[in-house]
Image (spheres, rainbow, N blue to C red):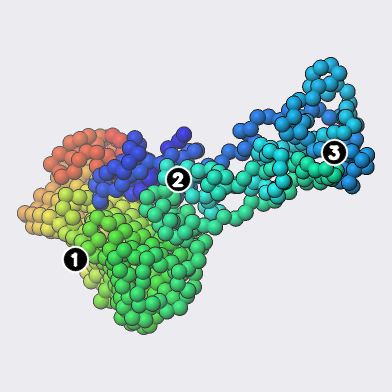
């Protein structure tokens, strides 16, 4: 049997590859960017391959639940006699006669598929055996039915002892589950348990033998096939769905489908002031007129199509859990109903997830505070229209936050006047998001004081237009890789694509930074290892001051007023770049980008940045706080997702097309 692992083992970035060799009980997996996750190995009757390529959308997998085996396969094969066309014709006549109350005045019996009444010995013919030697050989007081192949496919089950004939109930054939059809509940090991009569399952179809009596009793043959479609089973209760999802027994898709199939616990309208147990809001309009608290131990679920409107200044505080289960075609929405917007949505409890959503028109739209190691995931959401005194997402003392494949602050109708993400004393992964249109003098991502001894990640994002800094970091160990950053130029001295200051330890690889006032600005004792980035069309490519340190290898600098500005107290090591600077094997040359007008900085044929003779050996990591394995990992693909093959790769963020 193929194995399928817990969804989180493959979903979270850089978890051990496919959680191979997981034990059957929960185990701890270390994730360098966030909390340890529980990995539960599940048995699955067929392989469901799925891999997560770093920087791509996370796939959802379906856990197949096997259906019970057909009883026909388990019981002994029937020993029906071979019939000729003539015998079938005669049989039909005899059966019709029996149905009309006995045309010969003798009793007729419907035989079993072995050709004998239940409990009777096998009949012998003139040869002394049980075979039928002559066509249409029937006795004068016995009629034998044949078993049609369609009828054989039904779960008839073994014959019952003689007695009153109960009503025949066809055994429905369960269908294979899919993402939209309710499925039978799996057992804890992931496999469905076949129903049995003792457990309330369907009973075998009784024998079709006629009742015994003093008077001849006509018998009516059962129709050859009246099985019909299987009955539709109700979806699992919402509480069971939550338990199954949190244990890893079902996928997010099954959880979403099951929640939508359940009746909401509260009808559309004004939400009550007190919530208990598991609260399911279905498709429809809900309103919150005053501050509302979801207490500890309570689970609030927003199914697809749920629309929640908060009055001006209202706070929704989730001290328990929040699951938002929208779909691409029918997201759930939360918005402020007035011009001032709601105050905030506070997640300050246990595990919470928001999938496929639209959240807008509030001061701070999502505030994740003091969740510790409880995981919080936000994906495929539009987070927009926050007020200038707030933020899109605010993180504080949250050590396991994953925001991915979402859009923040790009709606022209919204007031994206503050940072898209502010993180304080937290650990996070920001992946594959589109972030833009920040107001002047505002950082798009303001990331400070990360959780010690862990690595935050900002990977695969697009940040465009405006703001003081696209990414500003201090007191963090962070990987910034494969981001596309453009147009942060509001302040010619301070605005930059990237800023690092006090105690920042940054590995930057594969980023494209274009049309910013400064490509990078480094202060105080920040350390940056800069590998295979492209910095173009800036006033200053890199400006380092105070005691900042920078190691620059394999990058492309072009069309900058000044490629590198290093003040007296700062230090730099510059080698193997396309750059206007002294150092080891640096080249001053046009990198021959494919085209610049379309923001396409692939390397054209003949580019001096292609296949440079420099091997990324372990000495790249020497003198840095980063391991060779971390460096090799971020260099596996370029900004466009093309594979790179170490040790010799093209310079810059993009290789040849």
For disc 2, the marked residue is: 187
For disc 1, the marked residue is: 494
Q: Position of residue 244 (x, y in %)?
A: 41, 52
- Do labels 2 and 3 touch, CB within 8 Å? no
Question: For the view shown, which residue lies furthest in the top direction?
Answer: 127
Q: Nearer the viewer, mark 1 or mark 2?
A: 2
Q: Nearer the viewer, residue 571 or 127?
A: 127
For disc 3, the marked residue is: 108
User: Considering only order in the chain, which callout, 2 or 1, is on the residue closer to the N terminus?
Assistant: 2
Q: Nearer the viewer, mark 2 or mark 3?
A: 3
Say which quarter of the image contains residue 547: bottom left
- Identify the secondary structure beneath mark 3: loop
Q: Residues within 10 Å of mark 1 (few under 14, many from 20)?
A: some
Q: What residue is rendered at 39% in x and 49% in y? A: 248
| Distance from the alpha carbon under mark 1 to that under mark 3 | 102 Å
- Identify the secondary structure beneath mark 2: loop
Q: Residues within 10 Å of mark 2 (few under 14, many from 20)?
A: few
| Distance from the alpha carbon under mark 1 to that under mark 2 | 60 Å
| Distance from the alpha carbon under mark 2 to that under mark 3 | 48 Å
């Amino acid at each position: 049997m193929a194995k399928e692992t817990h969804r989180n083992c493959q979903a979270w970035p850089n978890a051990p590859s496919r959680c191979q060799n997981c034990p059957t009980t929960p185990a701890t997996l270390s994730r360098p960017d966030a909390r340890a996750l529980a990995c539960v190995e599940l048995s699955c009757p067929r392989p469901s391959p799925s891999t997560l390529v770093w920087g791509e959308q996370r796939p959802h997998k379906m856990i197949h639940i096997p259906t019970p085996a057909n009883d026909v396969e388990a019981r002994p094969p029937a020993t029906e006699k071979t019939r000729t066309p003539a015998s079938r014709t005669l049989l039909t006549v005899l059966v019709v006669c029996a149905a009309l109350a006995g045309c010969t005045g003798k009793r007729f019996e419907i035989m079993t598929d072995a050709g004998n009444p239940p409990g009777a010995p096998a009949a012998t013919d003139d040869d002394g055996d049980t075979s039928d030697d002559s066509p249409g050989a029937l006795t004068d007081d016995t009629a034998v039915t044949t078993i049609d192949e369609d009828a054989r496919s039904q779960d008839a089950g073994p014959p019952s002892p003689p007695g009153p004939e109960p009503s025949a109930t066809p055994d429905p054939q369960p269908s294979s589950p899919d993402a939209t059809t309710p499925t039978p509940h799996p057992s804890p090991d992931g496999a469905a348990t076949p129903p049995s009569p003792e457990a309330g399952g369907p009973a075998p179809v009784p024998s079709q033998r006629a009742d015994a009596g003093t008077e001849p009793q006509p018998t009516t043959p059962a129709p050859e096939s009246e099985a019909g479609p299987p009955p539709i089973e109700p979806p699992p209760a919402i509480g069971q769905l939550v338990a199954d999802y949190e244990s890893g027994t079902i996928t997010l898709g099954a959880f979403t489908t099951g929640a939508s199939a359940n009746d909401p616990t509260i009808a559309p309208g004004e939400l009550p002031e007190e919530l208990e147990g598991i609260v399911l809001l279905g498709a429809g309009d809900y309103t919150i007129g005053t501050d509302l608290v979801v207490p500890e131990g309570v689970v609030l679920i927003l199914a697809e199509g749920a629309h929640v409107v908060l009055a001006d200044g209202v706070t929704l505080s989730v001290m328990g859990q929040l699951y938002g289960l929208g779909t691409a075609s029918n997201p759930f929405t939360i918005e402020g109903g007035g011009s001032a917007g709601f105050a905030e949505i506070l997640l300050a409890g246990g595990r919470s997830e928001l999938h496929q959503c639209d959240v807008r028109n509030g001061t701070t739209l999502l505030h994740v505070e003091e969740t510790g190691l409880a995981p919080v995931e936000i994906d495929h959401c539009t987070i927009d229209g926050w007020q200038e005194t707030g933020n899109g997402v605010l993180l504080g003392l949250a050590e396991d936050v994953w925001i991915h494949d979402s859009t923040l602050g790009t709606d022209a109708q919204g007031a994206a006047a503050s940072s898209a993400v502010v993180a304080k004393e937290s650990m996070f992964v920001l992946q594959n998001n589109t972030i833009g249109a920040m107001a002047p003098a505002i950082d798009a991502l303001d990331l400070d004081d990360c959780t010690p001894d862990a690595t935050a990640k900002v990977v695969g994002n697009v940040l465009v237009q405006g703001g003081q800094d696209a990414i500003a970091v201090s007191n963090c160990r962070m990987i910034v890789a494969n981001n596309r950053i453009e147009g942060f130029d509001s302040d010619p001295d301070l605005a930059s694509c990237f800023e690092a200051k006090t105690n920042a330890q940054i590995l930057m690889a594969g980023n494209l930074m274009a049309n910013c006032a400064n490509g990078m600005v480094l202060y105080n004792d920040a350390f940056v290892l800069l590998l295979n980035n492209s910095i173009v069309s800036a006033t200053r490519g890199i400006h380092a001051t105070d005691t900042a340190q920078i190691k620059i290898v394999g990058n492309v600098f072009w069309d900058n007023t000044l490629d590198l500005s290093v003040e007296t107290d700062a230090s730099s090591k510059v080698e193997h770049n396309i750059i206007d600077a002294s150092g080891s094997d640096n080249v001053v040359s046009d990198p021959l980008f494919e085209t610049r007008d379309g923001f396409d900085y692939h390397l054209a044929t003949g580019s001096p940045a292609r296949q440079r003779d420099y091997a990324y050996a372990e000495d790249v990591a020497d003198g840095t706080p980063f391991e060779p394995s971390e460096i090799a990992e971020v260099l596996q693909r370029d900004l466009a997702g093309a594979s790179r093959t170490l040790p010799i790769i093209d310079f810059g963020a993009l290789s040849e097309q």
